[in-house]
Image (cartoon, rainbow, N blue to C red):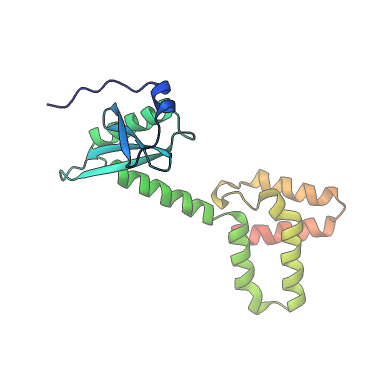
Amino acid sequence: MPKIVLPLADKAIKNAKPRDKAYKLADGGGLYLEVMPTGAKLWRMKFKQASGKESRLAFGAYDEVSLADARAKRDTARKQMAVGVDPAQAKRIEKQQKATVAANTFEAVAREWHSNKLASWQDRTATNILHRLEVDVFPLIGRHPIAEIKAPVILDVLRQIEKRGALDMAKRQGHATAERLA
């Protein structure tokens, strides 16, 4: 039979002092706060995988993740386990997906396109195109994931270029952008 644990109070967490060895303050449902000898306070959750093997999830440091947030993350993990999903694996998959989205920003894709075209361009052309992208486009949409950039956003970028009086540049950028998105 599982041990009954009283929920933690925020005051108890704040008053937890470091000791010679790391120790745990249980909150219930597998959630606990691990107090390290350095004074760091880390939220963790202990759970059993479908195979029966014990595993742990890390939810972050106490200052960054509040007691309520840690409990919400615990509840999410328990819901995942209830439907047969390993929360640790789900967290790894989510992290990989975020990394993939971050790697596929407009700037990353445009720079890759630029490097693929270098062999077919004159040096001056390659330099001019990269400069135009760095000055006119990357500051506006460079950090956005490529999958989230729609036609109205591109149109807005072109209008910004037109506003500064570079009508020929806007026309060229529009053509180059359409070629990349095709």
Picture quadrant where residue 114 is located: bottom right
Picture quadrant where residue 182 is located: bottom right
Q: Residue furthest front?
A: 20
Q: Residue at x 42, y 29 (%)?
A: 69
Q: Residue furthest left?
A: 1
Name above or below for residue 16 compared with residue 105.
above
Q: Quadrant of the N terminus?
A: top left
Q: Residue at x 62, y 71 (%)?
A: 115
Q: Is residue 165 left or right of residue 13?
A: right
Q: Residue furthest right?
A: 165
Q: Is residue 158 left or right of residue 35?
A: right
Q: Name the spot of residue 97 as percent of width and height, x first.
A: 43, 50
Q: Name the spot of residue 22 as percent of width and height, x first.
A: 33, 41
Q: Residue at x 36, y 41 (%)?
A: 58
Which one is in front, 152 or 1? 1
Picture quadrant where residue 153 is located: top right
Q: Name the spot of residue 161 as percent of width and height, x first.
A: 80, 52
Name above or below for residue 105 compared with residue 153.
below
Name above or below for residue 139 compared with residue 44.
below
Q: Name the spot of residue 40 as percent of width and height, x first.
A: 43, 40
Q: Residue at x 62, y 64 (%)?
A: 111
